[in-house]
Image (cartoon, rainbow, N blue to C red):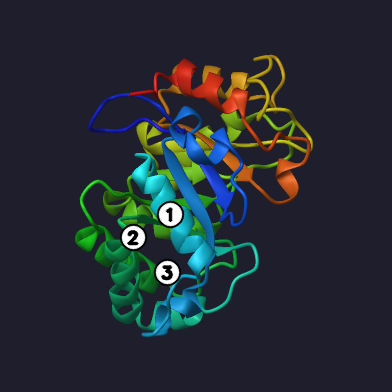
Amino acid sequence: QRKTEDSGSCCVRTKTHAYAGPSRNSVQTEATKYTNVAGISFIQPSNLMNDTFQLSDPVGKAIQSLRKQGVTVQLLVGGQISQGWSQLESDPQKAASNALKLMKMYDCGIEIDDEAGASNTAGVIKFIELISTGKPKGTHISMDIDGTPTRLQTEIVKGAIAHLDWVNSMVSSPMYNQTHSAVYSHQKAGVPFSKITIAYYAGTWVHNCETIGSKTNNGDTAAGLDIVKALGLRGLSIWAVGGASYAGCGTTSAPGFAQAMKALGAHN
């Protein structure tokens, strides 16, 4: 969930594992009720060094469905377990060229999720600069960082902040107060509050897919909404639709996401 610069409204961003097979009813077919920016996980940096790499058919169809519904899409590059960062860092021009082919083919942006820790931060900064300059109109470039940013993440963010639409402070413990993540991102990495999103789990340990919950519970998106408003943040991010952190959530709707969208004024 994020604020969009063109409309001045907040948004709900969800990260999702690309779906295939039967529709999840309104979660898939009425996606704009629940999100306005969807991040599709994951492609690897090593994929971007392959001139013939193509997205799988299910991933491509998921992106096309979301775009037809008016949801902005990002491809997530990396993840907790990732391959190929050293290759990307050594040849950011090639990686950016292949990334831009995908971005233009699917009308989507990119989110950098370098949890492995770049050894050549200049290479990642150059990659971000290149894809930001060449991105399709209306798409976004962003980066994930730890709740307490690492030294290498801090170096990348400081070097690339002009080319990043936002920086996402990732989920920590479900009960962790994400105010700390926002403040650390601002103080340690120099991210303007207006470019920070804070992340929350969808389910499993919480019930954010079903309700925004209570602002007194640090793991609930209601608490995140208060932080967004108090600090003037970009918005909220949800991890994830599908996978281990979606346990306990319905497959036909996600009313908690819709409530958050309404509270942030993200509906068109």
Instruction: Identify the mark nearer the N-term, 1 or 3.
Output: 1
**Image coords of residue 193 (percent x, y):** 40, 32
Q: Amino acid at mark 3?
A: Thr
Asked if 192 appears above or below 15 in the picture, the reply is above
- Density class for disc 1 (Cα within 10 Å; few <14, some 14-19, many ≥20) is many
Task: Work out whether residue 152 can be spotted.
Answer: no
Disc ID at residue 184: none
Q: Give the structural element (helix, strand or loop) at label 3.
A: helix
Q: Is residue 195 visible?
A: yes
* Up/down of 160 relative to 260, above or below: below
Percent coordinates x, y for residue 68 in the rendering: 35, 45
Say if 22 sits above or below 215 in the image.
Answer: below
Q: Residue at x 61, y 19 (%)?
A: 222
Gap between marks 1 and 3, in whole Å?
A: 29 Å
Label 2: how many Cα within 10 Å (few below 14, some 14–19, many 20+)? some
The residue positioned 49% from the left and 68% from the top of the image is 57
| Marks 1 and 2 in Cβ contact (< 8 Å) | yes
Q: Which residue is mark 2?
A: 106
Residue under numbered circle 1: 63
Mark 1: which secondary structure?
helix
Nearest the eye: 180 or 36: 36
Instruction: Place residue 8 in its image quadrant.
Output: top left
Q: CA distance from mark 1 to mark 2?
A: 7 Å
Instruction: Locate residue 267 relative to residue 169 in the image: left or right.
Output: left
Residue 209 or 27: which is nearer the viewer?
27
Q: Position of residue 158 (x, y in %)?
A: 37, 53
Which residue is painted at 44% across and 47% down in the image?
189
In the drawing, does residue 195 fall left or right of residue 250? Answer: left
The disc at residue 121 is: 3
From the image, state whether disc 2 or disc 3 is nearer to you. 2
Q: Secondary structure at mark 2?
A: helix
